[in-house]
Each structure stands twice: as structure tokens, then as C-alpha cells.
């Protein structure tokens, strides 16, 4: 497991895009608590097992801001697989 972000940010949501990229909804600043707006960079990799730590610099990966609805309830975690 690696940390894709080079700096601390609240990550609200992760989702896989149809083309294999990982989209991350990030807070605009490094603050505790919820936020109403964020930005969503998408990261591509040919080999997700060898992605280097700190690949995304949130200060350099600015995109247009989007609304972020506060999470009212955490979804039940899904088991995605087992690391060997």
C-alpha cells in the first residue's frame, strides 16, 4: 500500500473511471472536518502495484472545484481481495 498524495489532504471519495484511472475527491486545504467543495484529480498507472509514494501533489493538481455532499453514514466496507 502506498500514499498517492505527497501532502496531507482529506480524501472524501475514491472511484475507478472506465478507462482505469483512479479519481480522488480531495479537500482544497489540509483541515480536519468536512468540506463542501473539493477537486477531483484522476491518476493513471500501467502498474498499480508499483505506483510511487507521493505521486500526486495536491497543490499542483488543481482542477475546477466541485460540490461535495457530507457523508451521513459510512458505507459497509467491501472486501476487495487479499494481498499475498
Image (cartoon, grey):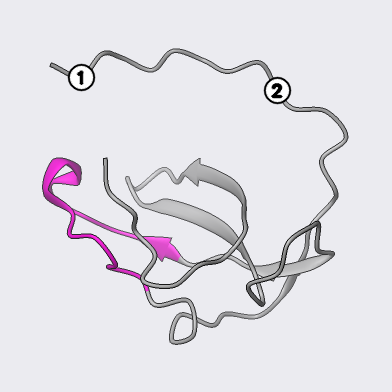
Report the span colored magenta. Answer: 42-56
In the displayed structure image, the side of residue 68 where residue 82 appears, left or right: left
Occupied quadrant, residue 28: bottom right
69, above or below 65, in the image: above
Magenta span contains residue 1: no
Residue 64 at x, y percent in the picture = 65, 80
36, above or below 15, in the image: below
Of 75 and 29, nearer the camera is 29
Q: Residue 75's mark? A: 2
Instruction: Residue at 11% x, 48% y: name it.
Output: 50
72, above or below 79, in the image: below
Residues tagged 1 and 2 counted as in contact (Cβ below 8 A): no
Q: What SS does tag 2 mark?
A: loop
Instruction: Residue at 58% x, 18% y: name it.
Output: 77
Instruction: Residue at 24% x, 60% y: name it.
Output: 53
Between disc 1 and disc 2, whose residue precedes? 2
In the displayed structure image, the side of residue 22 where residue 59 appears, left or right: right
Q: Residue 83's mark? A: 1
Amino acid at each position: 500500500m502506498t500514499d498517492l498524495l505527497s501532502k496531507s489532504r482529506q480524501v472524501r471519495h475514491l472511484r475507478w473511471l472506465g478507462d482505469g484511472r483512479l479519481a480522488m475527491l480531495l479537500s482544497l486545504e489540509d483541515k480536519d472536518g468536512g468540506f463542501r467543495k473539493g477537486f477531483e484529480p484522476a491518476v493513471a498507472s500501467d502498474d498499480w502495484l508499483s505506483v510511487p509514494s507521493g505521486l500526486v501533489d495536491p497543490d499542483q493538481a488543481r482542477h475546477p472545484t466541485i460540490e461535495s455532499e457530507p457523508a451521513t453514514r459510512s458505507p459497509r466496507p467491501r472486501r476487495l481481495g487479499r494481498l499475498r
